[in-house]
Image (tube, rainbow, N blue to C red):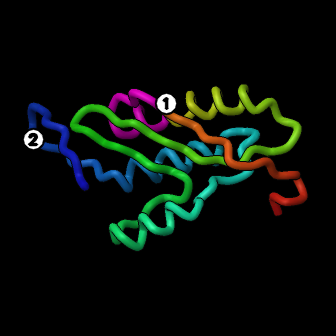
Amino acid sequence: MTEQLQLDMGMIKISDDVVSKVAGMAALETPGIAAMSGGLSEGWAKRLSGKNVQKGVTVEVGQLEAAIDLRIIVLYETPIHEVCRMLQQNVREAVESMTGLKVVEVNVKVEGVAFKDDEA
């Protein structure tokens, strides 16, 4: 689905996939994040909708706002609550600065813990 922003000079369309990709890149750049988690339900969503869903990222994009859900795997021995707060801030800032949309929420679900050896 593609939503539209109405501006004085015309219309700007930002697809869910673009917001999803921006959020996913910002998430992976956050210290303490080992990986994004896909899950079984995401595989079914891809098959049923035919859309290219960014791994571990689900977005709802409105005309002026976006809501983002992230499923992540954190590195072992990192303070999970601090990593998640930093993740929320990084994703919000990246999406808002790159798209102009207001991010109303960034929900984080920690689905696993990885050891540094697992990262490779």
Q: Which residue is labeled 1 in the image?
A: 93
Q: Which residue is labeled 2 in the image?
A: 10
As drawn, 51 above or below 22: below
Q: Which class describes the residues within 10 Å of circle 2: few (<14), some (14-19), or many (20+)?
A: few
Taking the image as shown, residue 12 lies to the left or right of residue 66, namely left
User: Circle 2 sits in a helix, a strand or a loop, which is it?
Assistant: strand
Work out whether mark 2 precedes mark 1 in sequence or the reverse, and give the earlier one: 2
Residue drawn at 88 percent across, 52 percent down: 116
The quarter of the displayed image where residue 38 is located: bottom right
Residue drawn at 41 percent across, 33 percent down: 97
Inspect the image, locate mark 2, and give the three-letter code of the amino acid beneath it.
Gly
Taking the image as shown, residue 7 lies to the left or right of residue 72, namely left
Return the x and y of residue 92 as percentages of the image width and height: 48, 31
Inspect the image, locate mark 1, and give the three-letter code of the amino acid beneath it.
Glu
As drawn, 44 above or below 108: below
Q: Looking at the image, how many numbered discs can be counted on the residues?
A: 2
The quarter of the displayed image where residue 55 is located: bottom right
**What is the span of residues highlighted in magenta in the rendered image?**
92-105
Question: Which disc, if any, is residue 30?
Answer: none
As drawn, 66 above or below 34: above
Q: Does the magenta stretch include residue 9?
A: no
Residue drawn at 50 percent across, 61 percent down: 42
Residue drawn at 75 percent across, 44 percent down: 74
